[in-house]
Amino acid sequence: MAVESTSYTEQTDEQRAIIEMVRQFVDEQILPKAGHYDAADEYPEPIVEQMKELGLFGVTIPEEYGGMGLDLTTYVMIVEELSRGWISISGVVNTHFIGSYLLQKFGSEEQKQKYLPRMATGEIRAAFSLSEPELGSDVQAIKTSAKKQDDGTYEINGQKMWVTNGLMSSLVFVLVKTDPDAQPRHKGFTCFIAEKEPGVSENTGPYAGLTVPPKIKKLGYKGVESTELVFDGYRCPAENILGGEAAGLNKGFPQMMDALEVGRANVAARGVGIAQRALELALRYSQERKTFGKPIAEHQAIQFKLADMATQVEAARLLTRKAARMKDAGERSDLEAGMCKLFASEAGRFCVEEAFRIHGGYGYSKEYEIERLYRDAPLLLIGEGTSEIQRMVIGRKLLQRHKI
């Protein structure tokens, strides 16, 4: 009796086709040019234009609004591929994706109609803003505030920090305090959709009162801008409260925390991508470089490093995809999102450092790609909640789920 052979696959045919397209784009357009943009700390405009053409800004936006309507699992696969090329490119998409997620889940129908079709094409791009100069992991310590004025608009005042795409975005999903007396504090926050002019540091006209100072100079993660945002008398219409004023006022905290779950899966995918690239570079270099009369890949010390790296990449990838699949299935994935973010970001750092060691002195040279990865990887340990915060989240959720 003939048995049909079936090959093991982790991807649907559609996912495989999309990932092959993205991988080709990364190999041809991103990897050869990332070094240039990184060295110049220059915004990769031509690459971003090509991403618009490929539809990458609308991956998760429903088809009725002009997007591809794909799930989070497919999206994290795409982010992994982009990050394999250069994590700054995944940064251009990431905050935009969080903005579209917030709109889809919590936005009013008017807000969806107004923004999602133009977001799907990349015509307008979104940023996402929680952090402040004196605010790290304690999100409830937000000082930026919004007060309702006589004309019905809200005046926003305060300073935000670490806004990826802060300059080039047209929309900023910003969490601010609207009820200073709320107890507990998190019941007094609202998410506003703040509109601005892309690429303009001092906004005027209807967007007056929003200034984008010069971008923050960073160790790595260059090319994509991280900025402060200064709100000084900026007026936001009440209908730009996420979900509308009636449904959204003082509801911003749970909305943003929900978005951080998908954000964590996204950062995890970036960790997987950078770890994968580090492994590729280490495998290539260790087979080309010879010491003591043979390729260093034949030395057991190097093989052990490669073995540990490959195992970490595989484990991080599986954890990340599980968290994404759970979210897609409509299940609570806060524990899994915390786990994949913790593990994959640490795996990214570990694999990059091992590849750096395998390269020896050349790893320290800007001639070799691993030097850029070595500067980019630490970002993942911080963004979307530090490793320490992830451990707190994981510990707390474990105890909640296994209460005796």
Image (cartoon, grey):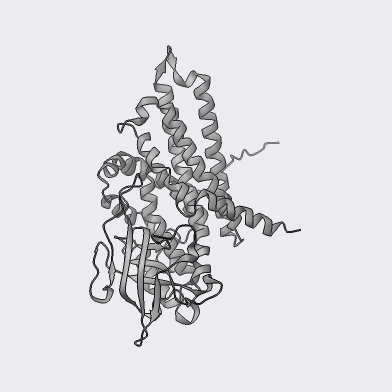
Quadrant the C terminus occupies: bottom right
Q: How many marks?
A: 0
317 and 367: which is toward the camera:
367
318 and 233: which is toward the camera:
233
Residue at image position (58%, 53%) is 392
**91 above or below 377?**
below
Can you tell which quarter of the image residue 93 is in? Answer: bottom left
**3 above or below 297?**
below
Outermost residue on the top side: it is 293
Can you tell which quarter of the image residue 399 is in? Answer: bottom right
Outermost residue on the bottom side: it is 150
6 and 131: which is toward the camera:
131
Q: Can residue 307 be seen at all in this image of the molecule?
A: yes
Residue at image position (52%, 70%) is 186
Spot occupied by residue 390 in the image (x, y as percentages of width and height): 55, 52
Quadrant the N terminus occupies: top right
Spot occupied by residue 108 in the image (x, y as percentages of width and height): 46, 76
Spot occupied by residue 228 in the image (x, y as percentages of width and height): 33, 60
Spot occupied by residue 184 in the image (x, y as percentages of width and height): 56, 72
Q: Can residue 11 be seen at all in this image of the molecule?
A: no
Outermost residue on the right side: it is 404
